[in-house]
Every structure is written in structure tokens, then in C-alpha cells.
Amino acid sequence: MSRRRCVLRCERKLVQFTLPKEESARKQWLDFIFTRTPKRYSPNLVLCSRHFTDDCFTNLGAINAGFAKRLKVKEGSVPTLFGPACSSESQPRKLVPVVPAVAVEGFHASASVPKKNTTNNADCIVGSDEELDFCDQDSVASSVDSSAEDMFIDDMDPILDRRPSSDLYLPEEDYDSKDAPQHRKRLCLSSAEGGDRKSENGFYWTETEKWQSSDEADVEPPLLVFTPNQNPGPQILPNRCSSALQFFQLLFPKSMFQTIAGYTNSYAAKYEERKGKLWNFISQSDMKSYVALVIYMGMFRCSSLSDYWSESQHFSLSFPAKIMSYRKFLSISKVLHLSESREDEKNILKKGTAGYERLGKIQPLYQVIRESCKSYFHPFQNITIVERMVKPQAGTGLKQSLKSRSPNMGFKLFALTDCTCGYTWDFFVYEGKSCASRSEGLSYETVMALVDENMLGSGYKLFVDKFYTSPTLFTDLLDKKVLACGPVWPNRTGYPKSAKNKLLSNAPRGTMRWIRQDKLLFVEWKDSKEVQMCSSFHKAYEGDTVQRKVRRDAHRTLEEIPVPAVVLDYSKNMEAVDSSDCITEHFRAIHKPKKWYQCMFYHFLDIAVENAFIMQELVTKGNGKKPLTRKAFLQALILELTDIDSLDSAAVPLTLSSSG
């Protein structure tokens, strides 16, 4: 999908038109965009349909009647509307948010401000309540159609983070297109003067404040008493679970096998009927065997799916053929379904309305896994929120990209994980842009949705990465009696703006600076690169050191350098989470399904298997016994799902009696 957007910074997803090739028309377009047309400009500038009147389009009637999808502009048409096209019936009459204006020479100041209405027709600017409540007409999330989504892909929050070119913000209620330059001038003058300055989120920074060094003492903040609502760890009786299958079925209930088998049979019967074939119904036992083979394929990797059923005398695997034929496994993989077909058909009819459920095809299993993970375990004190990517081949509007990990597209999940053991306590699938409140940013709302103090308790320590860390979030978490720390973007709203005694880019390794504002500590530390951290419960420096190679006289020697406590604590607690994240991506079927909900099924299975192993490990250690290794646990789970042990044990007496 194209990353280009309207040059006048329109936020709505509208049809875009490139500059015309004809010189006179192109000149008129450029005069509309720029106050003074620059000598050099991008030839890829686009304008959206908002800036054209109805008579500029050739197929507006066909669009309104539903016979055409792509709006076309007449040759020689010239844009004339700066704000929403109030007189145009082709555009919805909704409230258009004012985009923060940027002082860029050559652009109209009113380009990002709605055109003032001098008539009494008020609904040209503000639509009806029904229109304002309408949620996301496309019912799918576009991941790269705006600068906000681009920032999200880069692990930046479009509300809390600022691009270098947009440091100036003009609230829409404080100005209009007429007095915007004067308002901008007042802001520049006020920032040039001394005294206190207040950032957008209410944090005050004074010109007299300066960054402190590690030699200067810091006051340790008072810590909250850790009072969880339940005893941390597995919430099961010590003798209730004694096998791998029993731990697994706490999270993936036995009834769910029968439910998925029923949904699959219902969908497959209709699917095969359209092809003139009959579907051989599968049972609960078949579904358990299918899951066992999926886990088996995660342990033993082959180059292709058919290799598991190879009949080669020397290079074949005997186990899969004992459990299920290749044709049956492949047929189940193609029609695997997680929801009722009739409910899916009803949901499709709601597409384009607020009642449309984007995750309808995974909702039954999705809710069961989430509730089970929270019911049978309570997190220890240190927790974190991580992002996971499920990579499908299917094309849907829910796909996102995580650039730091892979260029591939996939489904993004946010998960609350225990730092001590890596247990996934809660998670949700990111559904893309919606009409929900985004006043504080996606990162803020993600944390607040997952950190439920009513279920967790108080005194928890939350470790998050740069995408989530913000002074606003950490302050609000303190109100919920939750402590937090993590690396922070230096351009994030609320980060200290003082330059006095700030860490220099050429400072030697181990140099640190810190500054405390209210209950928050900000630390800058020089390692191989500059590291910025924010915390609500750490002391600036407690005498800790780490070993690093430092260049001395053309030689690199191993030396002890100072390290802030927040950096050391953060690195230690994120190690267990990183290893758990890799495990949930490893045990997955070798084949790549084309249906997005099947990809989610395999990831939910990964979460259930990994959480079951962690609970087995903790319960067994609590009983004073040696727990199973991950490999032994998976082997035991596969055998119990396929009833291989019971078949083998039943065959032994028969062999002994016949030989006697």
C-alpha cells in the first residue's frame, strides 16, 4: 500500500491525485499548495479529493450509486478548497481535526486549518452525532497510509513522540488561519525568554535546573509495599496436575478440542459441498492428534511438510504416519476453523459498521486462552509488556510490521509477561486504527489496558521499552500504585529540556548524568551509544559497575565502568522475557497457512504450551522434585495427546502371554 499522503496533511483516508502533466494546470496546483512556488519540489506531491468541488469529478454519480470504486478527476480541474469540502456531496461531513501547523516557508498557513464558514450552515464543519459516532468505515486497519502509522511501525508513538520538523504545536482551539502567524510568533518569544516552561503534559522545567553527575548524591524514592491480590505463582493445587497433558489442558481445555472439531466440520462440509465432494467428519481425538503433530513438527524440522511422511528406507520419520495420514493432516490444515460459520456470515454483513467484529473468526479460542492464562497463574513482582509478531501469508487489514525484527508483515500482539519466569499472563491482538480515544497515545493505552491493578495488586514493577516509556504514563501508574522504568526517547513529551551539564556525545564510556523531577528520575549514560532511561523507583547511582572494553593507547582493555542502577536492573529483568519470546516463535508448524485466523491458532497454541511448561517447572520445584526439561515435557505432551503410552502399555501383556 502506498505510503504517500496529501501534501496538505489531511488525516482522512481519501482518494489521492498526483500533479497533472499539463504545465498550466500543474502551475495552478502548485500555486494552490505553495504561497511561493519553490524552484525545487517533489514531483510526487499528491492532493486528496477533499480539496476539489463536485464538478471536478467525472464519475461522482457512479460512486454514489455504488457502480464505481475509484474517484476520477477531470482534466484541467484545479483544487480550490483548503478545508473539508463542505459543498461536496462526495465527502462525508464530519468534524475534521486540525493538524498541528509547521512553520515551513512557502506553505499556506491555512492549509492544515479548516476553512472558516461564513454562512449559517453549521453542519458543513460539524456533522450529526450519528455521523461522528460512526466507527471506521473500512473496518480494517491500514498500517502504512499515514505518518502516524509509519511512526508506530518504527516503535514510536504518534502522540507522545515528535518528529524533528514538528516541534511546534498550535492547539486548534487557540487560533485560526488568520492569526496563526501571530500565535507562532508569541510562542517563539515566550520560549526565548527565561523562566519556567511547561511541556504539553504538565511537567515544568526551569532554566536553572541542570543535569547532575554520578558524584552528586541522589535521594532514593520511597518504595511501595508489594501486596499482590494472590500469592505469586501457579494458582493450582500441588497434587492436581501430575502430567504434561494436565498442565496443558488447564490453558487449552479438553472441551476446546471438541468445539474446534465441530466448527471445522461445519465449515469443511460447506467448503467441500461447493466442490461436489463429501467431507469425512473429524472427531475430538483427531483434533488432539493434529495438535500433537503440530508440536512434533516444531521439535523436528524438515525442509517440507511431505518429508514427515517420507517412505524412504533410510531417511523417513515413522511417528507421523502412526498418528495420521499425510492427506488427512493436510485436509484439516486447509479447513481448520475456530468460529461458527453462521456467525461469520452475520458478521460479514456488518462490515463497514461499528458492529463489525474484526477478530470474530478467533474470538472463541482467543477469550478462552486469555482467561485461562490469568486464572491459573499470578505474576511475581517484576512484569513487562512485549510486542510479538505473527507472520501469515494471508492479506488482511490487521497486518503490521515490526521493522526492528523483520521486514515481513504480520499481526502484532501486546502481551503482559512475568520477568521472573517468562509466563504470558495477558495479551491482546492489535486491531489497527479505530475511533477509540487516542488522546494519550497507543503506547499509553496499551499499558493501561494490560496492567489491571484490581486483578494484580499494588507494588508491582513494570519494565517497558522505548515505545511505552513516557513521564505521563509513569506518573499515572504511580497513582495506580505500580512502579515503572525503561529506556525513553529524548524527544518524548515531558523529557527534560535543560542543556546545562548535559551528557556530551564525545563523553568517555561510563559517564552518566541524571536529573530528578518530582517522583521521576531521568538518567543519561554513555555506553557504546548514549542510553536514556526513566524510572519511578530507582536511585541515580548506587556504586554498580560493569565490564567493558575501553580503548587505551591504541589497545582495548577490559575495565570496570560505572553503570546506573536502572540500566542494570532493566537488563537483568528483560533477559527471561527475551528467551520466552523466542520460544513462542519456535514451536510452530512447518507449513505456512494462508488464512490469518489459522496463524493466530498456532500462536495461541505456542502460548498455551510455553505457559504449561513454566507452570510444570514451578510446581515441580515447589514440591521438591526435579522438573522436566522443555524437550522432555514436549515429548510427554505429544505422547499423551496421541495416547501412544496407553497403546504401548496395552500391547505389552499380550506379547508376554503369547510368548509364554
Image (cartoon, helix red, strand yellow):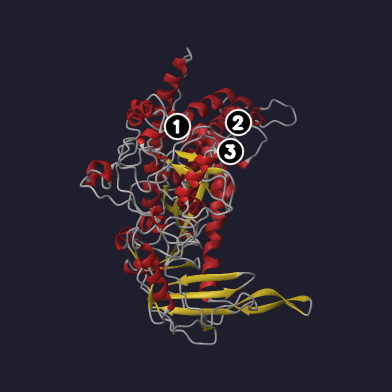
Indicate the quadrant containing the C terminus: top left, top right, bottom left or bottom right.
top right
Give the residue at the far left of this rendering: 120
Compute the Cα span from label 2 to label 3.
9 Å
- Please name whichever residue, 66 or 658, is drawn nearer the observer in this view of the structure: 66
The picture quadrant where one finds residue 173 is bottom left
The secondary structure type at the circle numbered 2 is helix
Classify 269 as above or below 510.
above
Which of the two labelled residues, at mark 1 and mark 2, occupies the earlier sequence position? 1
Q: Report the amino acid beneath label 1.
A: Lys
Q: Nearer the viewer, mark 1 or mark 3?
A: 1
Residue 90 horizontal side relative to residue 646, left or right: left
**Residue 610 shows up from this direction:** yes
Residue holding disc 1? 72
**Residue 235 shows up from this direction:** no
The secondary structure type at the circle numbered 3 is helix
Cβ–Cβ below 8 Å for labels 2 and 3?
yes
Residue holding disc 3? 296
Question: Percent position (x, y) of residue 475?
Answer: 36, 69
Classify 48 as above or below 380.
above
Question: Percent position (x, y) of residue 455?
Answer: 32, 58
Label 3 Cα crowd, 10 Å radius (few <14 / some 14-19 / many 20+): many
Compute the Cα span from label 1 to label 3.
54 Å
Q: Report the amino acid beneath label 3.
A: Tyr
Residue 116 horizontal side relative to residue 13, left or right: left
- The numbered mark at residue 320 is 2
Give the residue at the far bottom of this rendering: 216
- Please name whichever residue, 520 or 130, is drawn nearer the observer in this view of the structure: 130
